[in-house]
Image (spheres, rainbow, N blue to C red):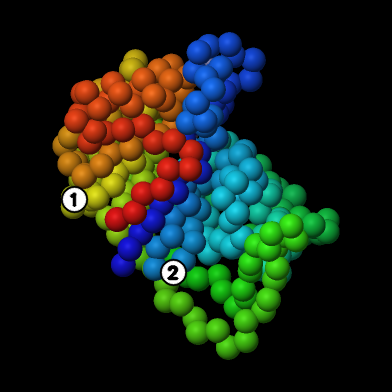
Amino acid sequence: MKAKLTFLGTGTSQGIPIIGCRCRVCQSADIRDKRFRAAALVEYGGLTMLIDAGPDFRMQMLAHRVSHLDAIILTHNHKDHTGGLDDVRSFNYIDHKAVDIYCEERVENTIRREYAYAFAEEKYPGCPEWRIHRIDDSPFDVKPNTGYKLDWVENVGYKYTPVEGEAPKPAVRVIPIRGWHAQMPVLGFRFGDIAYITDMSMLPEEEFAKLQGLKHLTLNTVGFKHHHSHFSLQEALDLAARIGAEHTWLTHLSHSVPPHAEFEEMLREKTGGAVLPAYDGLIIED
Ligand SMILES: [Zn+2]
Ligand SMILES: [Zn+2]
Ligand SMILES: [Zn+2]
């Protein structure tokens, strides 16, 4: 079963450019130096899944003309990964359906607190509608959210057509990868031969077995220096070498790494092209 991943955002929690910053990365004219908050769209087994819904969720959906989501899968409960969840309302209006969110209990607790209005007894009209599916570090199935067809029509917008008697698609199996973001537990995810890891500073020994035979691996780094909750560049390079995926892509990048073209050149020299920086809009397939 083929997996395809589109990077919707490859920036650190403030995105790039950072508001008010005059550094050469934030002022770069290279489109690859414009980075939304980290998120990825995965197409796998006929299902469309979003990993993380940060504050740039709306713009990411628009930029990639995403008109249907089977699931939103959350890595952890930091705001740069959950801050866009109110905007699932657009999918609610179009689909007349709740959006399925897959996350761990602690992430659910944060969502329930931060979006209390969406869980209130008496909701105001137009509140986001979602259904939470609790996961842990065991493999889980994502079920399709089907029963309708949705098309983007140029100059018109979304077109909604109910589908009568549509054959239900099978669920797909996702393998979570447990890691640590300083003291906070985080999940990465493997779909086929693509694994997506972000916001980790430690990957426990027992998780390496789940990362064998990868075509593409994504790892986070915010820069060259040691960081308390993210891999440093050297740590990411060492991990990439140890895991040995055909290609490793760096995400969650900050303005402390050089502009994209320079950074890419530097990594090509260091790794022969095995490890490269990701950029918004990059598509990888296994
Ligand atoms: Zn983050
Ligand atoms: Zn800057
Ligand atoms: Zn985080």
**Hey, which quadrant is residue 141 in on the image?**
bottom left
Q: Nearer the viewer, mark 1 or mark 2?
A: 2
Q: Which residue is mark 2?
A: 46
Residue 129 in the image, given as x and y percentages of width and height? 69, 60
Write the residue at 52% across / 60% down.
71
- Rendered location of residue 131, percent (x, y): 60, 62
Q: Residues within 10 Å of mark 1 (few under 14, many from 20)?
A: few
SS class of the residue under badge 2?
loop
Disc 1 designates what residue? 212
Rendering coords of residue 241 (x, y %)? 17, 34
Which residue is pictured at 33% across the width and 26% down the height? 264
Position above or below: 73 against 258: below
Taking the image as shown, residue 3 lies to the left or right of residue 234, namely: right
CA gap between label 1 and label 2 equals 24 Å
Position in image of residue 137 (x %, y %): 35, 53
**Mark 1 belongs to which amino acid?**
Gln
Q: Say what secondary structure mark 1 lies in.
A: loop
Q: Are marks 1 and 2 in contact (CB under 8 Å)?
A: no
